[in-house]
Image (spheres, rainbow, N blue to C red):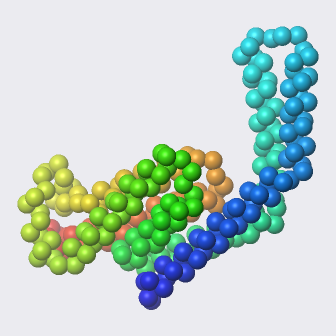
Amino acid sequence: MNPQFSVSKFMALLLVIFGLYVAVTEVSGADHAVADDGQQIQSEMKKSNEKPLKAESSEFVDMIQVIIKNGWSGYQKKESTSEAMAYQKNLTAMLETLRDVQKQASIEGILEVERAILNYENETVVNSAEMADSNKWAIAGMEEALVCVDYLTNQDRYADTVPVFSLSDTQNGLPLDAFRKFVQSHSSRLTGHLRSVSSELEKEVIRQRRENLATAEAAYIHKQDNALKIK
């Protein structure tokens, strides 16, 4: 299979998913039911103001409970739109594609697909300085990891690099080089994404990305073993 063609198809799938995500957001914003929920919130707050004053903290607790209840109702309605269904369908296609990538167990293929996702996120999803900075370091780490993969193709050349690694930068006799460190840091980054508010299917996609990195690292370690004749 042509790696470049596969990444191009994957990027096209990402663009479709993002387009549907935008459509879902727009529809949910125009949903009259959600607007009615907003009016109900205001009504509940007005009633709360008409009651005898309570302790300030208790009043805020009552208000936030009303907001949460009605916000969840609006969220459920948003998830049932035709646009949301299409978005979920494309997420399923993305998950299946990532699983196919893992089955190939190609270090370069897994990294190229992950780089495509990072570039997509950087161009369309990033909405804060913190996320932009995180993506910048992830992309930089990805580039260094790809250099390591290329370097490992020459086993003799790679073996010559071992003396430059201190004991603190090795694990079971193998160098914790830029590739290994990228996998560790990016896997932690993806784990952080799992704590964000998202659907279960979106989290499954993130988990699969993390599993793909683990598969790539296992293959990379095997190549390190062969190059350094550890086993």
Residue at the bottom extreme? 1
Residue 65 drawn at (x, y percent): 78, 30
Q: Residue at x 85, y 39 (%)?
A: 38
Please count the marks in the image. 0
Relative horizontal placement of residue 82, taking residue 17 as reference (left or right): right
Q: Looking at the figure, which quarter contains the N terminus? A: bottom left
Residues 148 and 180: in front is 148
Give whichever of 147, 90 is nearer the camera.
Answer: 147
Determine whether 62 is above or below 188 in the image.
above
Q: Position of residue 147 (x, y in %)?
A: 26, 70
Q: Is residue 226 visible?
A: yes
51 is higher (above) or lower (below) than 180: above
Q: Quadrant of residue 223?
A: bottom left
Towards the viewer: 26 or 37: 26
Q: Is residue 185 above or below residue 117?
A: above
Q: Quadrant of the C terminus?
A: bottom left
Query: Residue sitting at 80 percent across and 54 percent down?
Result: 28
- Specify whether 181 is left or right of 126: left
Q: Position of residue 84 (x, y in %)?
A: 75, 63
User: Image quarter for residue 11?
Assistant: bottom right
Q: Is residue 78 visible?
A: no
